[in-house]
Image: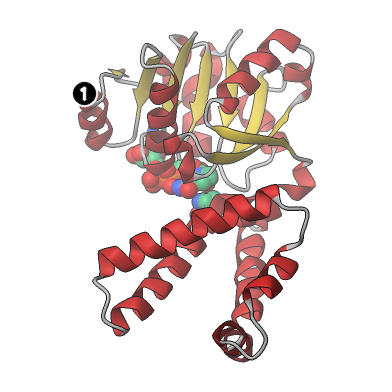
């Protein structure tokens, strides 16, 4: 199976890194809007093609990884050569209806929302297939198997894509912000920044594994950390007083609103 990427930016590179780790022999065609994609392709042993149309005609699965605003141009370039290929779109906020209107109503399309940890095969990905793809069980399995190489996959209703995008697609940025803020506090108290980042990251990994394997809720696990009269409850209450939980929900509200405004 040949995979073709249209767009060679952050998300394409993260997916390519994950796909090649899972299968170093994977054939990947690619075209992007700038010369940088060609340089990137050469450095990673990809097959750089001079047009989006060639990527589309020479691939079995086409991954649309350009920006949402590039869709009309890209669709006009590839539409004529779409026959049996399956299209995976990772365009944030762009519905299957819009994709079908741009690419043709008979084209098999999967709308996918990945996140950057796909680059270490630890992504969180939402997917939903359109009717033509639903009518092709073998192609459906092909797409789902491809996505599973990149991380945990969730079949998500289209109405839930915006909140999924905020909680999984955008949240690596929010979590990076949290890690960095904690590490800054570490620096304030004399730790070297890299050591502080390593300590916070390891703690986050451990906590995530604990939440995943526990029957207790995150609130209950937090309560177990906060010894009566101890230091944790003092910090916890100060974070609440300064609005950390509200700030997070407001951030998610803004993220969802922006995503919903794309289509
Ligand atoms: N970065 C992320 O964490 C996530 C991104 N996405 C989606 O992935 C898509 C790409 O986002 P990023 O990689 O972050 O942006 P980016 O700006 O890093 O990459 C965009 C790419 O599209 C290319 N491009 C521009 N015009 C083109 C054209 N006419 N034909 C082919 N390629 C063209 C650019 O050269 C660039 O390589 C977006 O639709 C975004 O919503 C989805 C989930 C997460
Ligand atoms: O920022 C964005 O628009 C994309 C969608 C989710 C993550 N990155």
At 58% from the left and 90% from the top, the residue drawn is 234
Q: Position of residue 114 (x, y in %)?
A: 56, 40
- Mark yes or no: residue 67 visible: no
At 40% from the left and 14% from the top, the residue drawn is 26
Q: Indicate which quadrant contains ligand 1.
A: top left
Secondary element type, mark 1: helix
- Disc 1 under 8 Å from ligand 1? The reply is no
| 105 lies above or below 164 | above
Q: Position of residue 181 (x, y in %)?
A: 41, 74
At 36% from the left and 23% from the top, the residue drawn is 30
Q: Position of residue 47 (x, y in %)?
A: 30, 16
| 182 lies above or below 76 | below
Given residues 11 and 186, the one toward you in this image is 186
Which of the 4 image quadrants contains residue 153? top right
Which of the 4 image quadrants contains residue 83? top right
- Mark yes or no: residue 160 visible: yes
Q: How many marks?
A: 1
At 50% from the left and 26% from the top, the residue drawn is 63
Left or right: 176 as drawn, with respect to 125: left
Left or right: 205 as drawn, with respect to 185: right
Given residues 116 and 65, the one toward you in this image is 116
Q: Position of residue 260 (x, y in %)?
A: 67, 56
- Residue holding disc 1: 42
């Amino acid at each position: 199976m040949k995979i073709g990427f249209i767009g060679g930016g952050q998300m394409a590179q993260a997916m390519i890194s994950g796909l090649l780790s899972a299968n170093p022999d994977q054939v990947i065609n690619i075209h992007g809007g700038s010369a940088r994609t060609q340089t990137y392709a050469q450095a990673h042993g990809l097959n750089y093609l001079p047009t989006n149309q060639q990527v589309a005609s020479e691939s079995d699965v086409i991954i649309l990884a350009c920006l949402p605003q590039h869709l009309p141009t890209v669709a006009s370039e590839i539409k004529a050569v779409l026959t049996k290929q399956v299209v995976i779109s990772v365009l944030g906020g762009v519905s299957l209806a819009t994709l079908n209107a741009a690419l043709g109503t008979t084209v098999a399309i999967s709308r996918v929302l990945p996140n950057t940890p796909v680059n270490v095969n630890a992504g969180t990905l939402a997917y939903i297939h359109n009717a033509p793809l639903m009518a092709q069980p073998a192609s459906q399995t092909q797409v789902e198997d491809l996505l599973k190489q990149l991380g945990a996959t969730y079949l998500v209703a289209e109405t839930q894509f915006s909140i999924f995008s905020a909680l999984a697609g955008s949240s690596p940025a929010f979590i990076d912000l949290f890690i960095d803020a904690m590490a800054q506090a570490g620096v304030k108290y004399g730790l070297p920044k890299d050591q502080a980042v390593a300590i916070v990251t390891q703690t986050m990994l451990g906590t995530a594994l604990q939440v995943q394997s526990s029957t207790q809720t995150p609130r209950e696990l937090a309560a177990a950390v906060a010894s009566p009269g101890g230091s944790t409850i003092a910090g916890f209450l100060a974070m609440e007083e300064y609005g950390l939980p509200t700030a997070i929900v407001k951030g998610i509200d803004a993220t969802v609103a922006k995503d919903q405004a794309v289509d």
